Image (tube, grey):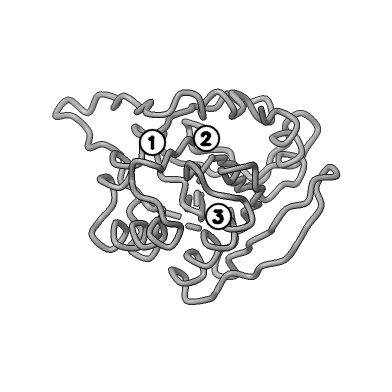
């Protein structure tokens, strides 16, 4: 269903509010903040994680904050809607995935000459799950952008069996890598921006939200 907010066109998904953080699956966020950035725990996504299990009383589960410095670089509001920010250190993030996820992510870090202690993840998303937007930061300490970005994208392509359509794009004057999952109708696009030893991952169908996110990135 479509609705208008702040004069921009956004995709709204109706559904139950989430009770815990979702992975930035590349898809997002990695594909799938990200996602749907794919569903949590997707078996073919090296960035997939599982949210903490609900308590017996079904009370909201606290969000992790293992990398608050990265959280501070993310927006707390997009399209007029407040976002929830949360983060993981590498070992905590890896522990949320299944065996295949852990293997894929560990292999990616190995290709970069790094390990779990060098990894940090921060994510921001609409806690109601209504707004098609997720943003995250994937940091591997000590890496260079011309090495980190292609290695991360290669891992995503491997995980999706080469299904991702990769192009270069310009949004608000910023050069981005655009990844599209042709198997998805909603939340199919993730934009990748290299910043030092970090990748900023923005999953959104509306480029106005991407522009807003880039303008708020610290």
- In the rendered structure, which disc, 1 or 3, sits on the residue that comes first in sequence? 1
Residue 158 rendering spot, x and y as whole percentages: 46, 72
* Nearest to viewer (mark 1 / mark 3): 3
Residue 114 percent location from the top left of the image: 40, 51
Mark 3: few/some/many CA within 10 Å (<14, 14-19, 20+): many
How far apart marks 2 and 1 lie (CA) works out to: 9 Å
First reached walking from the N terminus: tag 3 or tag 2: 2
Residue farthest along the left direction in this orientation? 56
In the rendered image, which residue does mark 1 sit on? 21
Q: Do labels 2 and 1 touch, CB within 8 Å? A: yes
Per the image, the residue denoted by label 2 is 125
To which residue does mark 3 refer?
148
| Cα separation between marks 1 and 3 | 25 Å
Q: Position of residue 195 (x, y in %)?
A: 65, 42
Secondary structure of the residue carrying tag 2 is: strand
Q: Say which residue appears at 34% left-offset and 28% top-offset.
A: 64
N-terminal of the pair, mark 2 or mark 1, is: 1
Residue toward you, 195 or 179? 195
Q: Tell me which residue sits at (69%, 39%) in the image.
A: 3
């Amino acid at each position: 269903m479509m609705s208008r907010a702040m004069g921009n066109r956004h995709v709204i998904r109706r559904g139950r509010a989430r009770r815990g953080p979702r992975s930035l699956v590349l898809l997002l966020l990695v594909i799938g903040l990200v996602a749907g950035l794919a569903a949590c725990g997707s078996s073919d996504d090296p960035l997939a994680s599982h949210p903490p299990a609900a308590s017996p009383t079904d009370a909201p589960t606290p969000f992790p904050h293992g990398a608050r410095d990265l959280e501070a670089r993310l927006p707390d509001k997009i399209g007029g809607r407040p976002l929830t920010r949360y983060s993981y250190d590498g070992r905590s993030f890896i522990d949320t995935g299944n065996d295949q996820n852990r293997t894929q992510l560990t292999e990616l870090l190995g290709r970069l000459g790094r390990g779990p202690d060098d990894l940090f993840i921060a994510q921001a998303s609409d806690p109601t799950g209504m707004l098609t937007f997720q943003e995250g930061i994937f940091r591997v300490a000590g890496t260079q952008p011309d090495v980190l970005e292609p290695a991360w994208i290669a891992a995503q392509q491997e995980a999706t069996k080469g299904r991702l359509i990769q192009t270069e794009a310009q949004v608000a004057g910023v050069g981005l890598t655009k990844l599209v999952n042709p198997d998805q109708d909603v939340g199919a696009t993730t934009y990748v921006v290299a910043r030092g030893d970090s990748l900023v991952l923005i999953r959104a169908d509306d480029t106005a939200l991407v522009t807003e996110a880039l303008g708020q990135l610290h």
